[in-house]
């Protein structure tokens, strides 16, 4: 089976618009025919695939139809070969489904909360709840860019993130000797989890 549009852009099938845009921009800059050092025809063909994938996934209606088509294809394959679904359950990159890469936001949240009284917070308890709500709304409406998200995560969880550049950037951190990895979508989720938790506490 040929690559899906998600695989062409190196994305999780549940990737949000901001992640799709970032992945396309990075790939277009890297593989644009004008910058190709080798076979320009090959680079042009790749750009056509990238453009087609991007245009399809960025349009809500066309993406919905495409996802439905993929779902039908996967269902047909599963019906034809039940064992195939066990060997290859989805088009989702394995790095996002492996247990060791899953974050532990609950532990990190408890750890940060227990130490928060020892550090001076940039916002008072009186205004923090409002601050969190406003920030949550900005994140939900995709008004916070990648760098701001990374800085926010480091501030909330009191840890450093390492950015791994690729088709779609990933982010890792070490906690109690164990390395955890996020993609942009899961990074967003744990940040929202932390902000929602703090807004309820305060």
Image (cartoon, rainbow, N blue to C red):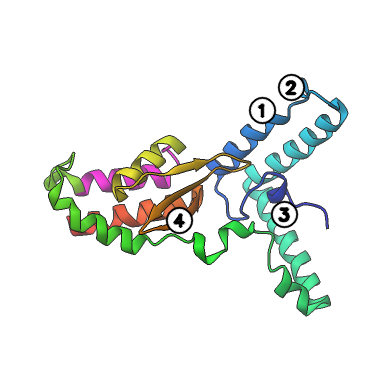
Q: Depth-wise, is mark 3 or mark 2 nearer the camera?
A: 2
Distance from disc 1 to disc 3, alpha carbons, whole Å, reads 25 Å
Q: What are the residue bounds of the magenta stretch?
A: 129-145
Front disc: 4 or 2? 4
Residue holding disc 3:
66
4 or 3: tag closer to the N-terminus: 3
Disc 4/disc 3 C-alpha distance (Å): 35 Å
Which quarter of the figure has residue 169?
A: top right
Counting residues from the start of the chain, the first of labels 4 and 2 encountered is 2
Give the label on residue 145, or none. none
Q: x, y percentage for residue 28? A: 68, 31
The x and y percentages for residue 35 are: 74, 22
Residue at the spot of label 2 = 35
**Residue at 46% across, 56% down:** 180
Dot 4 surroundings within 10 Å: few (below 14), some, or many (20 or more)? few
| Relative vertical location of residue 138 with respect to residue 102 in this rendering, above or below | above
Q: In the structure shown, which secondary structural element does the residue marked by tag 4 occupy?
A: strand
Query: Where is mark 1, residue-wise?
Result: 29
Disc 4 versus disc 1: distance between alpha carbons? 31 Å
Viewer-nearest of discs 4 and 3: 4
**Left or right: 126 as drawn, with respect to 20:** left
Q: Label 1 near label 2: C-beta < 8 Å? A: yes
């Amino acid at each position: 089976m040929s690559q899906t549009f998600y695989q062409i852009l190196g994305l999780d099938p549940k990737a949000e618009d901001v992640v799709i845009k970032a992945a396309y921009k990075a790939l277009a800059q890297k593989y644009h025919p004008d910058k190709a050092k080798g076979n320009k025809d090959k680079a042009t063909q790749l750009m056509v695939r990238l453009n087609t994938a991007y245009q399809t996934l960025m349009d809500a209606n066309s993406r919905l139809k495409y996802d439905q088509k993929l779902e039908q294809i996967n269902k047909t394959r599963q019906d034809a070969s039940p064992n195939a679904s066990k060997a290859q359950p989805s088009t989702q990159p394995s790095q996002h489904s492996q247990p060791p890469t899953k974050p532990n936001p609950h532990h990190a949240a408890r750890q940060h909360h227990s130490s928060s009284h020892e550090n001076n917070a940039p916002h008072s308890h009186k205004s923090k709840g409002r601050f969190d709500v406003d920030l949550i709304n900005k994140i939900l409406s995709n008004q916070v860019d990648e760098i701001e998200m990374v800085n926010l995560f480091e501030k909330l969880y009191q840890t450093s993130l390492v950015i791994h550049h690729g088709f779609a950037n990933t982010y890792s951190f070490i906690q109690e000797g164990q390395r955890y990895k996020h993609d942009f979508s899961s990074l967003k989720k744990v940040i929202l989890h932390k902000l929602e938790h703090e807004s309820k506490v305060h």
